C-alpha cells in the first residue's frame, strides 16, 4: 500500500511542478539554515579531530593577578591587576598531586615567519607554531601519517625535533613521508620527528602547522609554583579520570591557590615600604567544551546559548511551515472535486489522508536531502565566515580556516533536524487536509460549479 501511495505521490508531484518546487525549496532552505546553526555550535563544543577528549578535559588558560605595594605610612595599596597565562610549573607542583587528574599538558602559542626545507624549498609567510610537551599527544589524539610523537630524549638537547602537519609537509616536500628530513624555522634547525593529519584551525587549542618542544621556548628550569611565579605563557589542559569527582578536583585546586595567596599575604606582613605583593584574584578552571564558548558574542551561559539557538531553530522551521500550510490549503481547495469523486467511489477519508501525508512526506524527504547538500556546500565553501558568525572577533587569525569531514558528516544533527522538520511539515499538511475532508461528498463534487 505504501508503494502505491508513493507512486501516486510522485505522479502528483510531477503534475504540479511549481507547487512541488516551492515546497522543496522552502524545506531545503529551512533545513540548511537550521543545520548550519547546529554545525556552528557542534564545531565549538563537540569531540572533533584531534580534540576527541573535549568532554573529559578541563582548561586553565587565564588567571587574574593583582599587585599591591606597601606605602611609606604602612598602608597596603593595590596598584595594578592583569589577566595572564600561567606558569607550567603548576603541573608538577600542584596538579600532579590531585587524585582525579589523569594527565596534564602545557602549551604555548607562537608564529614562525620563515621556513626552509633541506631540499631548498622555502616559505616566507606567517605559520602557526605550538610549543608542547610529551603529554600533549595524550590529551589531544592526533593521527600520525608518518613518524611518531616526541619521546623523552627529544625534549631537550640536540638535535632538536619538530612535528609538522601533512599540509605543510606536502607544501615543502610534496610528500608526507618526510620523517628524518630537516627544516629550518626562523633560523633554528629541526629534524622532523613525525607528520600529523591536518588539524583544523577551528580546533584552536590543538591547531598548528609546526609543533616544537616547549624546552626550546624555556631553556631555563622552571621555578617552583608560587603566587609570585604564577604568571607565565602557557595554557594548561587536564584530562580527568571520572566526572563524578570533577567538583572535588576543582575545589582542591582552588583551595591550593587560596593557601598560596595566604602564604604570600603572611610573608608580606613584615615587608618594608615599597615592597610589592602579588595575589591571584581569580583562577579560572573550566571544562574544555565550556571554554570553547568564551569567544561567543553572547558571552552567555550554555543555557542562554541553547535558548537562543532553539528560538532561532523554531523560527526558521515554523515560519516556512505556516507558509507551506497556506499553500497546501489552497491546493486542497483545488482538489475538492477529486476528493469528492474518490469518496463517492468508496475511498475512505483515512486512505485519502494517508495519501496526502505521503505526498508531503516525499516532498519533505526530497527537500531534506537538498537541504543537507546545501548545508555542506554552504559550510564547506564559506567556513571562514559561517563558523565564526557568532564569534566576538578576538580569535587568532590563522593561515587557513579549513574544516575536517567529522565536523560536517554528523548523522545526529541531520536526523534531529530532519525529524523536527517532518513533524512540522506533516502538521502543516494534516491541518488543511483535515478541514478539507470535513466537507460532504456533495459539497466536494459541486466545488467546481462555484
Image (cartoon, rainbow, N blue to C red):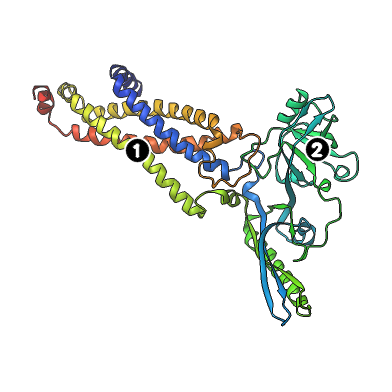
| Side of 221 relative to 361 (left or right) | right
| Residue 135: image tag | none
Which of the image's four quarters has the N terminus? top left
Residue occupied by mark 1: 424
Helix, strand or loop at label 2? It is loop
Residue shown at 12%/22% (left/top)?
448
Q: Residues within 10 Å of mark 2 (few under 14, many from 20)?
A: few
Residue 236 visible at all: yes
Where on the picture, by quarter, is residue 49?
top right
Callout count: 2
- The disc label shown at residue 186, or none: 2
Residue for point 38% across, 39% down: 316
Which mark is nearer the camera, 2 or 1?
A: 2
- Would you identify the image quadrant in which residue 162 lies? top right
Task: Looking at this view, name the residue that lies furthest to the right.
Answer: 158
Q: Position of residue 41 (x, y in %)?
A: 53, 43
Structural distance between the alpha carbons of marks 2 and 1: 58 Å
Q: Is residue 91 left or right of residue 373?
A: right
Residue 1 in view in this figure: no
Q: Earlier in the sequence, mark 2 or mark 1?
A: 2
Locate residue 310 relative to residue 10 in the image: left or right. right
**In the figure, 318 relative to 291: above or below?**
above
Across and down, in percent, residue 74 comes to 72, 81
Residue 395 higher or lower than 165, as above or below: below
Position in image of residue 251 (x %, y %): 65, 65
In the rendered image, which quarter contains the C terminus? top left
Circle 2/circle 1 CB separation < 8 Å: no
Question: Could you classify mark 1 by the number of other residues whose Cα lies within 10 Å: few (under 14), some (14-19), or many (20 or more)?
Answer: some
Q: Nearer the viewer, residue 360 or 85?
A: 85
Expressed as whole percent of the image width and height from the top left, the position of residue 149 reads: 79, 39
Amino acid at each position: 500500500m505504501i508503494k502505491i501511495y508513493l507512486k501516486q505521490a510522485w505522479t502528483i508531484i510531477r503534475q504540479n511542478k511549481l507547487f512541488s518546487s516551492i515546497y522543496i525549496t522552502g524545506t531545503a532552505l529551512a533545513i540548511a539554515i537550521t543545520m548550519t546553526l547546529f554545525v556552528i555550535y557542534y564545531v565549538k563544543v563537540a569531540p572533533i579531530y584531534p580534540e576527541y577528549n573535549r568532554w573529559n578535559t578541563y582548561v586553565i588558560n587565564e588567571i587574574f593577578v593583582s599587585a599591591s605595594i606597601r606605602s611609606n605610612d604602612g598602608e597596603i595599596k593595590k596598584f595594578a591587576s592583569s589577566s595572564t597565562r600561567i606558569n607550567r610549573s603548576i603541573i608538577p607542583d600542584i596538579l600532579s598531586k590531585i587524585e582525579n587528574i589523569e594527565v596534564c599538558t602545557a602549551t604555548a602559542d607562537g608564529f614562525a615567519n620563515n621556513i626552509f626545507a633541506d631540499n631548498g624549498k622555502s616559505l616566507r609567510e606567517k605559520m602557526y607554531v605550538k610549543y608542547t610537551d610529551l603529554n600533549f599527544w595524550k590529551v589531544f589524539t592526533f593521527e600520525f601519517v608518518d613518524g611518531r610523537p616526541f619521546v623523552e630524549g627529544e625534549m631537550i638537547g640536540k638535535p632538536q625535533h619538530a612535528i609538522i602537519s601533512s599540509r605543510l609537509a606536502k607544501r615543502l616536500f610534496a610528500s608526507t613521508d618526510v620523517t628524518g628530513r630537516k627544516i629550518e624555522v626562523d633560523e633554528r634547525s629541526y629534524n622532523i620527528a613525525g607528520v600529523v593529519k591536518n588539524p583544523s584551525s577551528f580546533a584552536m587549542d590543538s591547531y598548528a602547522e609546526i609543533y616544537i618542544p616547549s624546552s626550546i621556548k624555556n631553556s631555563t628550569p622552571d621555578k617552583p609554583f608560587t603566587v609570585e611565579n604564577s604568571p607565565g605563557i602557557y595554557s594548561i589542559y587536564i584530562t580527568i579520570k571520572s566526572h563524578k569527582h570533577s567538583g572535588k578536583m576543582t575545589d582542591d585546586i582552588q583551595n591550593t591557590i587560596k593557601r598560596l595567596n595566604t602564604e604570600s599575604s603572611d610573608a608580606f606582613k613584615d615587608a618594608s615600604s615599597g615592597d610589592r605583593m602579588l595575589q591571584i584574584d581569580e583562577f579560572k578552571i573550566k571544562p574544555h567544551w565550556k571554554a570553547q564558548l568564551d569567544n561567543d558574542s553572547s558571552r552567555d551561559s550554555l543555557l542562554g546559548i541553547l535558548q537562543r539557538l532553539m528560538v532561532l531553530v523554531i523560527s526558521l522551521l515554523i515560519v516556512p511551515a505556516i507558509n507551506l500550510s497556506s499553500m497546501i490549503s489552497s491546493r486542497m481547495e483545488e482538489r475538492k472535486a477529486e476528493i469528492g469523486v474518490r469518496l463517492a467511489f468508496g475511498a475512505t477519508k483515512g486512505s485519502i489522508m494517508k495519501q496526502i501525508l505521503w505526498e508531503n512526506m516525499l516532498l519533505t524527504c526530497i527537500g531534506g536531502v537538498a537541504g543537507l547538500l546545501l548545508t555542506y556546500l554552504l559550510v564547506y565553501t564559506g567556513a571562514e565566515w559561517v563558523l565564526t558568525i557568532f564569534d566576538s572577533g578576538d580569535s587568532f587569525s590563522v593561515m587557513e580556516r579549513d574544516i575536517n569531514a567529522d565536523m560536517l558528516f554528523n548523522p545526529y544533527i541531520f536526523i534531529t533536524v530532519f525529524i523536527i522538520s517532518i513533524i512540522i511539515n506533516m502538521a502543516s499538511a494534516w491541518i488543511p487536509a483535515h478541514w478539507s475532508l470535513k466537507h460532504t461528498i456533495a459539497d466536494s463534487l459541486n466545488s467546481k460549479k462555484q
